[in-house]
Amino acid sequence: MWISLGINPHFCAELNMLLGEYQHNLDSKGRLAIPAKFKDKLAGGAIITRGIDNCLFVFATKEWDILAQKLVALPLAQANSRAFVRLMLAGAMDVILDNQGRILIPDYLRTYADLKKQVVVAGLYNRVEVWDSSRWAEYKKKTEGASEEIAEKLGELGI
């Protein structure tokens, strides 16, 4: 089936895509079990930082390097650029998966994202987002309710 569509069957694996939505619990020390599907993509190291919408972003080291280069190239003289760079870079911490496939989320990042015990780990192609479960449910409900408007705006951008 894949071949008849002209798509390489190994295409998704080669891209190292991070996709899917998973429910997990933080343990008492603030460790998060990374979904099995993401482990090999993050096994070489990862960076966790403040995200947008009060979630956390987790990038494989290679993806983080690409983003960091773009961030440091932003104009230093613009207040919004400085603020965004500070949000992303000053909050960043490198993390390593332990033998059980968990990462330790630092206290300041757990506080920023208001993470309690139940969290959602969402794969978004080149990054993972970590959300408090209740905040994710609210966000998803709001976004799904505005899906037609969002689709129209994206259509204006040619997507």
Image (cartoon, helix red, strand yellow):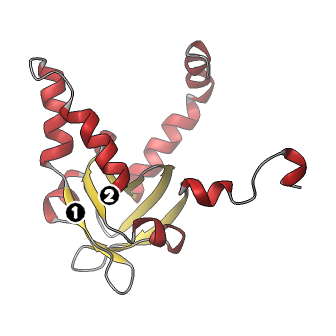
- Residue sitting at x 14%, y 30%: 83
Residue 29: where, in percent of width, then height? Answer: 21, 79
* 117 left or right of 19 in image: left
Mark 1 neighbour class, 10 Å CA radius: few under 14, some 14 to 19, many 20 or more: some
The kind of residue on which mark 1 rests is: Asp
Most foreground residue, 151 or 77: 77
User: Dot 2 corresponds to which residue?
Assistant: 61
- Direction from residue 100 to residue 27 in the image, left or right: left
Residue at 28% across / 34% down in the picture? Answer: 70
In the rendered view, tell whether residue 115 sits above or below residue 78: below
Q: Quadrant of residue 11?
A: bottom right
- Where residue 99 appears, x then y in whole percent? 35, 87
On the image, numbered disc 1 is attached to which residue?
94
Element marked by disc 1: strand
In what quadrant of the picture does the C terminus appear? Answer: top right
Q: Are marks 2 and 1 in contact (CB under 8 Å)?
A: yes
**Residue located at (31% from left, 41% from top):** 67
Q: Earlier in the sequence, mark 2 or mark 1?
A: 2
Q: CA distance from mark 2 to mark 1?
A: 8 Å
Q: Specify few, some or many for label 2: CA neighbours under 10 Å numbering under 14, 14-19, or 20 or more.
A: some
